[in-house]
Amino acid sequence: MKKISQNIIPITLALAAALVASAVMLQVTPNSSWMAFTGWVIFFLSIQTPLFLNVIVGVAATISALVILLTMYTTVTERTRQIGIMKSLGMANASIAWIIAQEALLISFFGIVTGILLTFILRFLLTKITTLEVEISLTVVIITFVVGLIGGALGALYPAMRAARLDAVEALSYE
């Protein structure tokens, strides 16, 4: 258990710090890392919405990426023998990494769809119970969908690479 926490904590802190810093900044200059893309998404959101909402979006994106990272890391750890069998049968490293990434994207997709559906249900209930009018724009829904999928993909990177780098002999003897 100690080995798992030692591997996850630095990556978790780096992702959290990068995404929260991106969410707080109003002007982002591009660079070659993934943070630039996240920064541009947050910058686009800052044009559309107030700063407080940007911070909330950044924190939510960070949490979703971390949940996906931890879920997929646990999945890779639990399925080490199966990954070893796939590697021993000749499956390419890229194929194994793609399987893990697909699982993470599927989890992200269902989480995003559930969140959007719950938002529309809550909107319906608020308009029936109170006199509040809640406006949900298509742009915000699309941005939510894209940011959620990007968070899921980023959260899947480390577990997918870890699964791809496993040695077949060591993976088969794992238990």
Image (cartoon, helix red, strand yellow):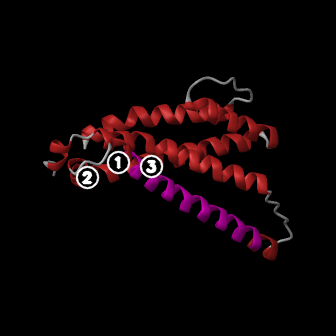
The dominant secondary structure in magenta is: helix
Task: Look at mark 2 in the image and give the residue it sits on.
Answer: 86
Q: Nearer the viewer, mark 3 or mark 1?
A: 1
Q: Which residue is mark 1?
A: 96
User: Does 83 sit left or right of 12 as displayed?
Assistant: left
Quarter of image, res 10: top left
Mark 3 lies on residue: 101
Relative vertical location of residue 37 with respect to residue 175 in this rendering, above or below: above
Tell me which numbered mark, 2 or 1, is placed earlier along the sequence.
2
Q: Position of residue 175 (x, y in %)?
A: 16, 52
Circles 2 and 1: CB distance less than 8 Å?
Answer: yes
Give the number of callouts. 3
Q: Amino acid at mark 1?
A: Ile
Magenta residues span 96-124
Residue displayed at 25% across by 52% down: 86
Judging from the image, what secondary structure is the residue with disc 1 in?
A: helix
The amino acid sitting under disc 3 is Ala
Find residue 145 and report its horizontal and vertical position in percent.
Answer: 65, 53
Q: Is residue 3 magenta?
A: no
Which image quadrant: the N terminus? top left
